[in-house]
Image: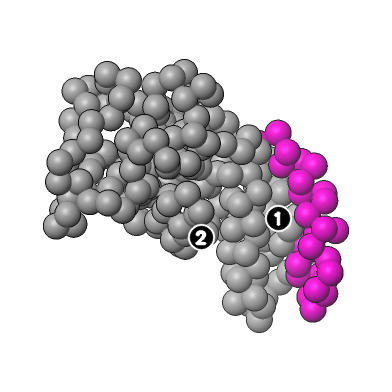
Amino acid sequence: MSRVTYRDCIGRTITVTVPPVGNVVTLDQVKTWLYIDGTDEDDLLNGLIAAAEDWVEGFLGVKLLDQELTFTADWFPGQNDNNNLSRSVLNENQRGGDLAIVLDYVPMTAVNSVSYIDASNTANPLVEDTDYTPVIAGPKTNGRVQPINRTWSRFADQRTFAACQVVYRVGYADADAVPDVIKTGIQMLISYMYNNRGECCGTCAMASGAKQILGPYKVPLL
């Protein structure tokens, strides 16, 4: 599964700080699906498992297995009137006017901490139920963190970039908890990649069947 850190055009960064353990589908399950005996292709199949699970996570907007993510943004919502963050991804009209921090990836299971980063690069934790309330949503709804008084304080020593930090956990508890349909989609992708090695134009064909069965689990874009 993906370990990447990315920063988008409005200053949000998502980092996998504690990666998941294992995979959603096992090597033995894939070999059974593909009618493969022996171990000669185990390395190849392990690579295909990782690639297929990455693709499914990206397509669905989920993290499949339990892991810790760290979200940062240049500002808390509403602190900077010129910051697109409070007008688009954290749109007050869509989020009930409470300037919530809406977090990427589902299912969110916990918010470990919310902090502001000061000019000396030190994280200063805010207090749950005093400064903010975490909203743990369902498997198809993004979790969020909303300020107690419907607005975020501006801290005097807050640095001018990546000042907002949320550490949270996402993902199903273990592989057994991942819906069987998602596992089937992963194995369909693995099967296509295994049987069509070397093709550079097969992405749409590869994804079409998997998209059809995975569609109901796709999380709407923020």
Q: Amino acid at mark 1?
A: Gln
Give SS at disc 1.
Answer: helix
In this view, which residue lies farthest toward the front? 82
Which residue is denoted by mark 1 in the rendering?
A: 187
Report the colour scheme: one colour
Quadrant including the C terminus:
top right
In front: 192, or 70?
70
Label disc, if present, on residue 2 of the rendered structure: 2
Label disc, if present, on residue 56 of the rendered structure: none
Specify whether residue 181 is painted magenta. Answer: no
Give the mark, 2 or 1, whose residue is nearer the N terminus. 2
Image coordinates of residue 59 in percent, x first then y, are 66, 49
Image coordinates of residue 44 in percent, x first then y, are 64, 76
Image coordinates of residue 49 in percent, x first then y, are 62, 63
In the picture provided, is 105 more to the left or to the right than 199?
left
The image quadrant that residue 41 belongs to is bottom right
Q: Residue at x 28, y 48 (%)?
A: 163
In the picture provided, is 60 more to the left or to the right than 156?
right
Residue 186, compared with residue 39, is above or below; it is: above
Using the rendered image of the protein, determine whether residue 173 is visible from the camera's viewpoint. no
Measure how far apart labels 2 and 1 are at the Cα level: 18 Å
**What stretch of residues is rendered in magenta?**
191-217
In front: 212, or 100?
100
Q: Residue at x 71, y 62 (%)?
A: 190
In front: 104, or 12?
12
Q: Residue at x 59, y 50 (%)?
A: 57
Few, some or many residues within 10 Å of mark 1 (<14, 14–19, 20+): many
